[in-house]
Amino acid sequence: MKSFLAFLVLVSCAVAQSTPAEQTTAPPVSPNEAPTHAGQSATDLENSRKAKELVQQMIQALGGQAYLNMQDMSQQGRAYSFFHGQPNSVGTLFWRFYRYPDKDRVEVTKQRDVVYLHTGDKGYEITYKGTAYEDPKLTEEYNRRRDHSLEWVIRKWLNEPGIALFFEGNTVAADKPALQITVLNAQNDSVTLYLDQTTHLPIKKSFSWRDPADKLRNTEDDVYDGYRAVQGIMTPFSVTRFSNGDMSNQRFLHEVSYNTGLKDSLFDASITYDPSKLPRKH
């Protein structure tokens, strides 16, 4: 089962790696609606206005209301895991079913007989043995990536009070000219977005977090490529993840569909055994 654990961190997502569905129909605050703060200079206000304008252009590039109103997504593809930047697998077939905001099911292997399920903040692993809680560390990693996913930043963060946007200027991301924007929420948590200078589609998303155990700061990056229009939503068919600068996962999509009305049963889970209490083999 360990061969699948590295793949699990791909799901973010989705993501992967949100707010209740009723909040997804309203676009984020427009540049003219955002509150201003006393003491801001004219330069600060212009910077904020520019950042909000670029965010709106990004949302429109992704599909506008079609993107904001997406309720569920189905994917099929192949994922690869890496260790210290080097591939350590020949690729794993996967089928993913995601319902916004926080229901996510990933089936792996050709037989689709291993399932990773996330509902709310809980994670489960389903195999021929039955259903058990997922390794808590993997669930924590999944939840952290989901909370900083592109979907959550756009559809949740931007609707929260106290949000601030900063235009950081022109830069290069994934070897492409980019526009850099930082989104800061009221909890002083931030995500940096890199937009294609021509299309305004996201090229890269980055966030950092401090490990409570060793107090070290870690950086997670997602790089998006191979965009295609699917049902009015611009969808990256290639997503590469980097952890502290090293490539850790890569996902290539073969098929994608939206708003198919996924059944509730796909996301049901009932614990049937506890791996820690299984008898040891001698």
Image (cartoon, grey):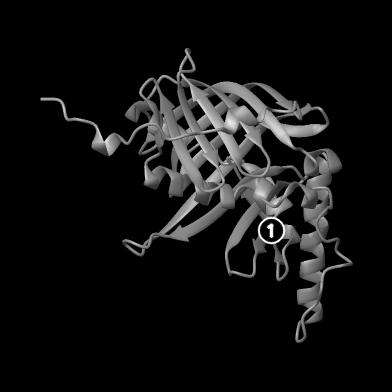
Q: Looking at the picture, how far across and down is residue 9, in whole percent?
A: 47, 39
Q: Please identify the quadrant where the N terminus is shown.
A: top left
Residue 221 visible, this orientation: yes
Along the viewing direction, whichever of 72 and 253 lies nearer the viewer? 72
Locate residue 5: give its quadrant: top left
In this rendering, the count of numbered labels is: 1
Residue 39 is left or right of residue 269, and the answer is: right
Locate residue 44: give its quadrant: bottom right
Q: Please identify the quadrant where the C terminus is shown.
A: top left
Relative height, residue 167 to residue 196 (above, below):
below
Relative height, residue 210 to residue 238 (above, below):
below
Q: Residue furthest top?
A: 111
Please tell me how crowded label 1 is: few (under 14), some (14-19), or many (20+) other residues with Cα within 10 Å.
many
Along the viewing direction, whichever of 160 and 205 lies nearer the viewer? 160
Residue 44 is left or right of residue 112, and the answer is: right
Q: Looking at the picture, how far across and down is residue 212, in whole percent?
A: 37, 63
Residue 164 is left or right of residue 81, and the answer is: right
Q: Amino acid at mark 1?
A: Trp
Q: Which residue is mark 1?
A: 157
Q: Looking at the picture, how far across and down is residue 141, in whole percent?
A: 45, 47
